[in-house]
Amino acid sequence: MAVSATKTSELQAVNAILSAVGEPPVASLGTLDSTNVEQVLQEAYVSIQESGWSWNTREHDFNSVPSADTYVYVVPASVIKLDQNLTDNRNLTIRDDYLFDLVENSNLFTTSNTKTLWVVELLSWTSLPQSARTAIIRRASRMYLQRYLPDSTLLNTARIDEQLSYTTLLREEHTHGNYSIFQNGITGYPSRNAINKVIG
């Protein structure tokens, strides 16, 4: 079989996990044999991205929506969290898919000005860099073994593979993240948060 010069697809990711646990590949997603693997892959997909990286942390303009005599700010479903290290107004958070003011204890605002905040966004699989896809696959493989085959001799290998892929992801982040100790914002936060994340 010729080597494919393309990034790893979701189907290839599922089959990579199945291969890691000694199971045969599937021809398509959504099959009975792949359901549990796809669920674990989804968990790892969110777990890796929620740390916040240079490739999924950006500024976002929140526009107000009238609500009686006040205003609300709807948060897109793809936004995982506000980046508090980069956001000037740290009184804001996300609750029930709206911006929420922790001081006023409300999601209702009296002004309608656009709020520009840094957010961590959940990217689609096809938008992820290859190093992130690999890290997700390796984490999902370890999670699957730990959950369904905890006594497997493959678990230690899976843990090592996960750590190696995460190290590669961190190294790439430092190389391409434009980090500087003399600047604030995107130049410092995502990688710090990722480094502090413990691989369990």
Image (cartoon, grey):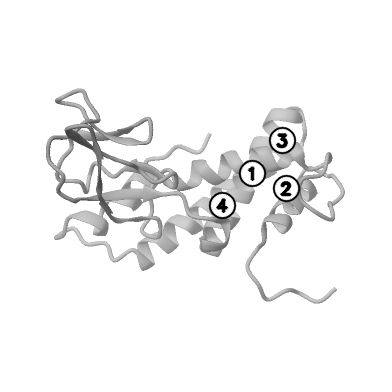
Whole-percent x and y of residue 65? 26, 43
Mark 1 or mark 3: which comes first in sequence? 1
Question: Label 2 to label 4, Cα distance in Å?
Answer: 12 Å
Whole-percent x and y of residue 25? 84, 52
Which residue is label 2 attached to? 17
Tag 4: amino acid: Ala
Q: Which one is in front, 170 or 137?
A: 137
Tag 2: amino acid: Ile
Labels 1 and 2 touching (C-beta < 8 A): yes
Q: How many marks?
A: 4
Q: Is residue 34 left or right of residue 7?
A: right
Bin the neighbour count of mark 3 within 10 Å (Cα to Cα): few under 14, some 14-19, many 20 and up: many
Q: Which one is in front, 88 or 95?
A: 95
Q: Which mark is residue 41?
A: 1
Tag 3: amino acid: Leu
Labels 3 and 4 touching (C-beta < 8 A): no
Give the image quarter of residue 186: bottom left
